[in-house]
Amino acid sequence: MITFERFSKRFGAVDAVTALSLTIEPGEIVALLGPNGSGKTTSIKAAAGLIRPSAGEVRLGVPGRPASEAEARRLSSFLPQKVSFPDALTGRDVLDFYCALRGRPSARVADVLRFTGLNGASVRSVGTYSGGMMQRLALAVAMLPDAPVLLLDEPTAALDPDGLSAFYALIDARRAAGQTVLFSSHQMGEAERLATRFVVLIGGHLAASFTAAELSARLAARGVMHVSLDRQPADLLDAVRQVAAHAEWSHDALHVHAAPAERAAVLDVIRASGAVIRGLTAEEGRLDAFYRDLVGGKP
Ligand SMILES: Nc1ncnc2c1ncn2[C@@H]1O[C@H](COP(=O)(O)OP(=O)(O)OP(=O)(O)O)[C@@H](O)[C@H]1O
Ligand SMILES: [Mg+2]
């Protein structure tokens, strides 16, 4: 549905994206991750047909059409990272304008207003909007066409918790309808909650691409269990290290890096040592730590 084929974009001397190859199937919700300036906006704009490749191709639809062609652009709806609407217009005016532009029935405006929770503010001029209201309006505009491909560049950066819930519901509905979403984000929790696939760009290059299932498998191995014991039996650490990759003492607690499947064996070894378990907690691996390792400490 979205195909990047050795897509490259150069701005003057800057290589914003280099030879990106990526195929996004219908029904996928793809989170585009990466540090500032890594090429996320450039790639999303190219899929929206707003940036022409310096080399390679970006296609939309089945069969694929170059993203800049009118036929391809009709398939997508794009939410820019930086939005601006004429200050003097009301939110409602803006939505009426885009609704007519995309040839949607005017009743659609009421739907998206309700969904994005903008109702009360829709009669005010856009110049009086807060940052979050602007983002809600931009999201409402992006929802108007009900396009099969949603391209969202940092859609939630300014949203409050209510706005976030509305956004999550929107993405869940799009996924249930088999539509395709490509969104960029710096919020790892949000990406984990929504995406069926994660794509990481670093310095304009594809650094990683993994499905939610692959992520779960990789994160499982990063889980840590903390077991508080009544004492420190002399040979326990060595015995635990036979069944789990890493283990160390911290005061009276044993910290063990172990996937969920290995944890029962760790507990068996501890019990066999005769020590009494006073407390037990487990932390699962998180996308944000995994991401930080991938980008090597860059923000
Ligand atoms: N119109 C432009 N002219 C010159 N350079 C540009 C232009 N647009 C983007 N760039 C450069 O291309 C690179 C990638 O920018 P891009 O906006 O795609 O990054 P990003 O991953 O979206 O970053 P952020 O997380 O900050 O939004 C950066 O080095 C940026 O300075
Ligand atoms: Mg960007």
Image (spheres, rainbow, N blue to C red):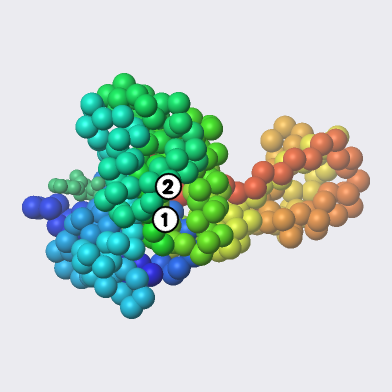
* Vertical placement of residue 112 versus 45, above or below: above
Give the image location of residue 29, x and y in percent.
47, 58
Q: CA distance from mark 1 to mark 2?
A: 10 Å
Q: Nearer the viewer, residue 112 or 216?
A: 112
Quadrant that contains the N terminus = bottom left
Quadrant that contains the C terminus = top left
Q: Quadrant of residue 16?
A: bottom left
Q: Nearer the viewer, mark 1 or mark 2?
A: 2
Dot 1 falls on a residue whose secondary structure is: loop
Labels in figure, total: 2
Q: Quadrant of residue 185?
A: top left
**Marks 1 & 2, CB-CB < 8 Å contact:** yes
Q: Earlier in the sequence, mark 1 or mark 2?
A: 2
Residue identified by numbered label 1: 146
Would you say 233 lies left or right of 41 here? right
Residue identified by numbered label 2: 108
Rendered residue at 49%/38% (across/down): 114
